[in-house]
């Protein structure tokens, strides 16, 4: 029973030699994959497209597993169980939002990207709205990815340093070095196959925790009994209050839009599914990704419920044994596996697997965006060898930049889970709006999309800053009750109680927060809605400005850029129609092939040959 855990205190937390050996073995396998792909490529062809997209010959299953691993970083490995512990199993509604995202991406966005044969998703923005919009999209992506990756690298370093005594700076720099090393050597293929291995490691860690924790509690029925009495089995939350952190609607509306901004407009994900052999396989990769996401999120949330069953009478946060909700999982692992050397090392490998996957994905994607969107016009006519060397140099540079960003983020007081999703919502939300305007609304013009993105970004940034100043109280967010009634009195000191009074999981309602009104209430909405609001505002403002300044004539939009006429207009398109977009609302003057500086980016005729055996 869990009573065996309530009166014990975790003495001298730390890892043994076997734990570090398990962790080191996981890192060694990741490095070995990068070395293998590097040697394998040296024996065959060596092209820039192969480095960034695996030669567009990657099979669906490993790409799908790579997609689901890319955003399941240590932020989620450590954050999702804590959120389920504090808010209940309704967190599983996140799977519904992810499923809607996968379906929308596969049917609406993937056909556009795949049939255009692009390497960077921002290439679409250039073809639809011009070079300026492409540069803006690239800049937004690079900023968001650097910030997000910095948080991802910092998360396990901070949490594991506090919970296990592992040196934070050694953790931070080793993570960045390993990711940079195998990404620089192996490119996309190294990233994808390493992600496959890391998904297996993540799931192994979760399964070990669930099984052992359930046995300690007394079985599945006892876990469900305790969780039900503690209100953790709470799927009937259909309230419309936007200030409630999690509900059915925040996951299905806000969650869908957040994930859609990651999959439909984020280069890190687009780059993966366009690396598949055919369009049909790319769609299957997204569906494999969805299964993987549901399995990982469900496993992580189940860990949170098992954790609540273990500590329902002695909450580690309320008793002062940990200082932040993100430390729940490391604490539980070190507690329940203290007599099983090597298993805590598996958890460390589990947390780092998510981090390695996300960081390697980000490094490769940032290098691809820089090459394709910023440097390629300056490299016309240069050799493939020179371009590959430059690509590897960019991967190394961005790896170092991510580590530097992580070091700077350590100076800020950010929550890892909310902080990472807020970054993606604030920056990627308006970018998703730009793609929606370009693909689905023919009337959108250049001024419309620029103004829309600017207004959407400013609104999201204003909301994010305001939410950090006027956060809702734990009661408004829907934090479920915890107890420390059965803890040893010696374990709960006055200083610990003071610390816990400041924690969001147990602090009483602040009178100032209770009297919030007007803009303060607006600032207090769930962070899952940030992306949905910024995307919606971008689309509405962009459409309004386009109508006021003269909408684009549908006939002036080049073939293959609109979803509505994608099928008939992606067949036998002349190469001269694939450069910069025509002047809006003016007679089209075709460019000669010799003067089309961008023609090499998109070869629709070649794409049609690839597509011929994979029509959806």
Image (cartoon, helix red, strand yellow):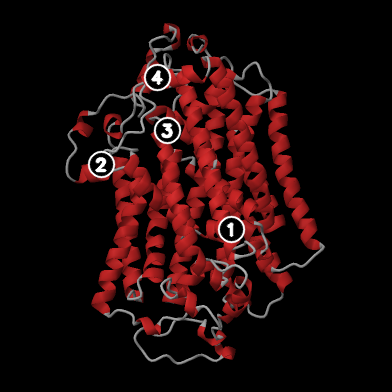
Mark toward the start of the polypeptide (2 vs 1): 2
With 232 as the anchor, is 198 left or right in this view? right
Nearest-to-viewer mark from 2 and 4: 2
Describe the element under mark 2 as helix, strand or loop. Answer: loop
**Residue 64 sits above or below residue 323 on the image:** below
Asked whether the residues under the numbered discs 4 and 1 touch, taking CB atoms below 8 Å apart as contact, a structural biologist would say no
Location of residue 56 in the rendering, given as x and y in whole percent from the top left corner: 65, 65
Residue depicted at 60% across the width and 60% down the height = 281
Tag 3 residue: 83
Tag 2 residue: 240
Describe the element under mark 4 as helix, strand or loop. Answer: loop
Tag 1 residue: 272
Nearest-to-viewer mark from 3 and 2: 2
Cα–Cα gap, marks 2 and 1: 36 Å
Nearest-to-viewer mark from 4 and 1: 1
Residues packed near mark 4 inside 10 Å, few (<14), some (14 to 19) or many (20 plus): many
With 41 as the anchor, is 245 left or right in this view? left
Tag 4 residue: 318
Cα–Cα gap, marks 2 and 4: 30 Å
Mark toward the start of the polypeptide (1 vs 3): 3
């Amino acid at each position: 029973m869990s009573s065996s855990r309530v009166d014990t205190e975790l003495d001298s937390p730390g890892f043994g030699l076997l734990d570090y050996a398990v962790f080191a073995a996981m890192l060694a396998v990741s490095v070995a994959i990068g070395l293998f792909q590097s040697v394998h490529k040296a024996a065959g062809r060596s092209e820039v497209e192969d480095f960034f997209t695996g030669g567009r010959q990657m099979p669906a299953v490993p790409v799908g597993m790579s997609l689901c691993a890319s955003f399941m970083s240590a932020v989620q490995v450590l954050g999702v169980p804590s959120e389920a512990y504090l808010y209940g199993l309704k967190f599983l509604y996140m799977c519904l939002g992810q499923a809607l995202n996968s379906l929308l991406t596969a049917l609406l966005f993937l056909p556009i990207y795949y049939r255009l044969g692009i390497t960077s998703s921002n290439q679409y923005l250039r073809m639809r709205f011009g070079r300026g919009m492409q540069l803006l999209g690239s800049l937004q992506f690079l900023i968001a990815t650097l910030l997000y990756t910095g948080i991802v690298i910092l998360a396990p370093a901070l949490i594991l340093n506090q919970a296990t005594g592992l040196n934070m700076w050694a953790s931070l720099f080793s993570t960045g070095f390993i990711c940079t090393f195998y990404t620089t050597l192996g490119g996309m293929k190294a990233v994808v196959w390493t992600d496959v291995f890391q998904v297996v490691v993540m799931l192994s860690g979760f399964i070990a925790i669930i099984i052992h924790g359930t046995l300690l509690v007394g079985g599945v029925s006892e876990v469900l009994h305790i969780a039900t009495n503690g209100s953790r089995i709470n799927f009937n939350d259909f309230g419309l209050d936007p200030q409630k952190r999690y509900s059915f609607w925040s996951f299905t509306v806000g969650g869908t839009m957040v994930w859609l901004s990651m999959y439909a407009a984020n280069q890190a994900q687009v780059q993966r599914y366009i690396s598949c052999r055919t369009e049909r396989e790319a769609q299957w990769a997204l569906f494999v990704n969805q299964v993987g996401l549901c399995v990982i999120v469900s496993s992580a949330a189940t860990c949170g419920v098992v954790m609540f069953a273990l500590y329902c009478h002695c909450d580690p946060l309320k008793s002062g044994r940990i200082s932040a909700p993100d430390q729940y999982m490391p604490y539980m692992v070190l507690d329940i596996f203290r007599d099983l050397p090597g298993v805590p090392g598996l958890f460390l490998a589990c947390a780092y697997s998510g981090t390695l996957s996300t960081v390697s994905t980000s490094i490769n994607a940032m290098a691809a965006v820089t090459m394709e969107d910023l440097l390629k016009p300056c490299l016309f006519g240069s050799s493939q060898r020179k371009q590959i060397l430059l690509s590897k140099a960019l991967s190394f540079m961005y790896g170092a930049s991510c580590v530097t960003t992580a070091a700077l983020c350590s100076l800020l007081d950010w929550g890892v889970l909310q902080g990472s999703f807020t970054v993606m919502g604030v920056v990627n939300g308006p970018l998703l709006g730009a793609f929606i305007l370009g693909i689905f609304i023919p009337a959108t013009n250049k001024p419309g999309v620029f103004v829309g993105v600017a207004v959407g970004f400013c609104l999201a940034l204003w909301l994010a800053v305001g939410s950090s100043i006027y956060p809702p109280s734990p009661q408004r967010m829907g934090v479920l009750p915890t107890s420390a009634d059965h803890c040893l009195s010696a374990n709960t000191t006055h200083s610990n109680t003071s610390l816990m009074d400041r924690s969001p999981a147990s602090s009483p309602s602040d009178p100032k927060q209770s009297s919030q009104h007007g803009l303060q209430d607006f600032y207090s909405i769930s962070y899952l809605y940030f992306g949905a609001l910024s995307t919606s505002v971008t689309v509405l403002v962009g459409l309004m400005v386009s109508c006021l300044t003269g909408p684009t004539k549908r006939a002036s939009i080049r073939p293959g850029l609109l979803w509505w006429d994608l099928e008939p207009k992606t067949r036998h398109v002349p190469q001269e129609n694939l450069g910069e977009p025509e002047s809006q609302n003016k007679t089209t003057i075709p460019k000669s092939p010799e003067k089309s500086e961008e023609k090499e980016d998109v070869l629709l005729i070649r794409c049609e040959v690839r597509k011929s055996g994979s029509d959806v």
